[in-house]
Image (cartoon, grey):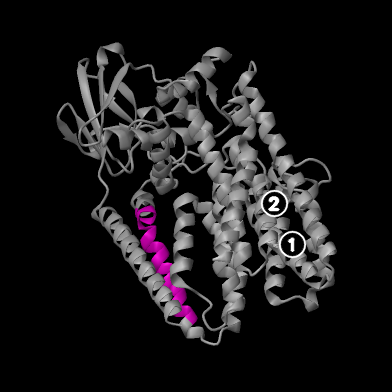
Amino acid sequence: MRDYKKASYSLLLIAIIALFFISPQIFQRSLIVANDWIFHMNRYYETLMQIQTGHFNYFQSLFGFNQSGRVINAMYGADFAYFAGVILAIVKNWYHFELILNFLCFFVAGSSMYLLTRSAKLNNQIAVLCGVLYMGSPLIVWWTTTQGFSGMGAAFLPLAFIPAIRMVQNRAQPIQPLVFGSIFALLLSVHMFTTLLACMAILPFYITGFIRSNRKLHMLGQTLLSIFIAICLSLNTFAAILDLHTDTLIMPLDAAGLYNGGTFLSMGAMNYNNFGLILSLIFIFQFVITVTDWKHMPSVIRLINGTGLVFFIVSSKYIPWNHLTEHFPSLLSIQFLRRFSGITCVLLILGFGYSMGRLHHYLNKKEVKKSLMVGLAVLGLISTTSGWQLIDKQAQRWNSDTPLSGDTNAAEPIETDPVKIRAGLSSSDLSQAFAITQKPTPDYLPTKTNLINGYSTYSKEVLHNELTVTKTVTDDAKLKITWDSNQTDNANIVLPVIVYNHSTVNLNGKELSSEDYHLSDIGALIVTNNHKENTVIIGYQPPLFFTLSLYIKGLTFVVLILYASWKYVQKIRLRTTK
């Protein structure tokens, strides 16, 4: 009971720190509209409208993304998108919605780091410190200031290392399939790239645990069971990706170069690429400790520090990345090296917690131990202040003459009057936000020509299509488009709607096959001009295995909940009988 009370107070403190991080937005009543805001808010507006209208379509965008019918959420964390849609349905306001998501990002980051540190058997005060330090790391702050979704994925990242630590420390039962599988299913539901990084980072822990295990075959069996659980709980994600593999999709644009997105140490204030004074000192300290005390370190701390330092090097400007990409251009698909820094921050902060825990253990006087904890608390608060300043700087733009953040250069502003911008983004009609700015992001559009950059084509054919059309959603969750083809003398008409290989196309009551129409370079539907009023209905017909995947996912979830409840009851009974 005492441990639960400590944990409750600790999580309450983490919640207060999370409120501190978003306080600039609260005090200034400011919305931060940065580079990826319009992309992600279109995703959440889509799920909101599907929830409100009851017109559910897992694949097509029926309401968001200019009602273009393009596939986004099915390829990009659909589970989290529907969760966010529920929140948006409750608050009905972009400002409050952003505050809640930002708070959740900080709170989840701090509490997941706290849980990791406690599972590593460190004391409660050090666990809170580690949680606070991680909350103020650049990648977590990045979500609030730029809506970079890697930050939201990084908030859940510490959970992946809870089973990783167990693999090394528990030889008899190195893997708990329910915990291991559920954690990675959660990561998959939020951000695929973060999950891939987590898999890479826990590999050294797994190999070490396997070598040390007394029951290797049992460990392999538990590993396969963990993978099975993770796949079953994420089956809709894999089924959707498998369903779309017949299309050649435009993937997120490769970076022009990796060097500018690399991280580095600094003795000044933190920003998106440098770790700032406190984290830089912590990482340097961990490097020195690791090098000088390698032989005497427990194997788990070697793995933590060693893996963290490797990921730091990979994420940094200390490698000549631009020279490497000349020989290996596929590396440009990484986009931002800072994405790797989430692993660095989790592991080196955890390693620092171990170092401080050992120091605290060997100190004899209570006064000295108290001074150490006060000093560590000061470090944590300085680190949070650095992240707070970045958020405050972005929040100040809202009440300026340029309410949209300066990094929205990839977006197309529709409205330039700051008063109208603030009014549109504050309107109770959430769709007004998309009349302020738009972004011609071509992610996951189908292409027949291996098109790499579809920004200009999407802008021309969808966002700025000259054809006047009316778009509505049918009762069976399909997109209905009507237009008068007398508007144009062209032989062919490009409609602002996207068609995939498994899309269904009905023109004026007639079902069309793929031979009956043409598609543009980004999959926009092209029909022959008949100089009449026309109606086209675009749907999406996923195969049976996708529908089955939803049932399997739901059934797996119910079974695991029942099993976990049964195990908990058994545990309680065992305690009461002793």
- Residue range (magenta): 219-239
Left or right: 464 in relation to 112:
left
Q: Are marks 2 and 1 in contact (CB under 8 Å)?
A: yes
Q: Which residue is mark 2?
A: 133
Q: Is residue 8 left or right of residue 461?
A: right
At label 2, counting other C-alpha atoms closer than 10 Å, the crowd grade (few under 14, some 14-19, many 20 or more) is: many
For the N terminus, the image quarter is: bottom right
Residue depicted at x 78% and y 62%: 286
Res 271 → quadrant: top right
Above or below, 167 against 17 in this view is below
Tell me the residue at 58%/25% (across/down): 29
Circle 1 residue: 352
Q: Is residue 233 magenta?
A: yes
Query: Is 118 in front, or is 298?
Result: 118
The outermost residue toward the left is 509
Relative vertical location of residue 484 with respect to residue 370 in this rendering, above or below: above
Q: In this orientation, does residue 406 appear?
A: no
434 w.r.t. 225: above or below = above
Q: Estimate the x, y position of residue 229 in percent, counting from the top left.
A: 39, 66
Calculate the distance from the C-alpha at mark 2 to the C-alpha at mark 1. 10 Å
Could you tell which of marks 2 and 1 lies nearer the N-terminus? 2
Q: Is residue 550 left or right of residue 126?
A: left
**Residue 319, horizontal then vertical, whole percent:** 75, 53
Name the amino acid type tagged 2.
Answer: Leu
Q: Position of residue 403 (x, y in %)?
A: 60, 21
Identify which amino acid the numbered label 1 is placed on. Phe
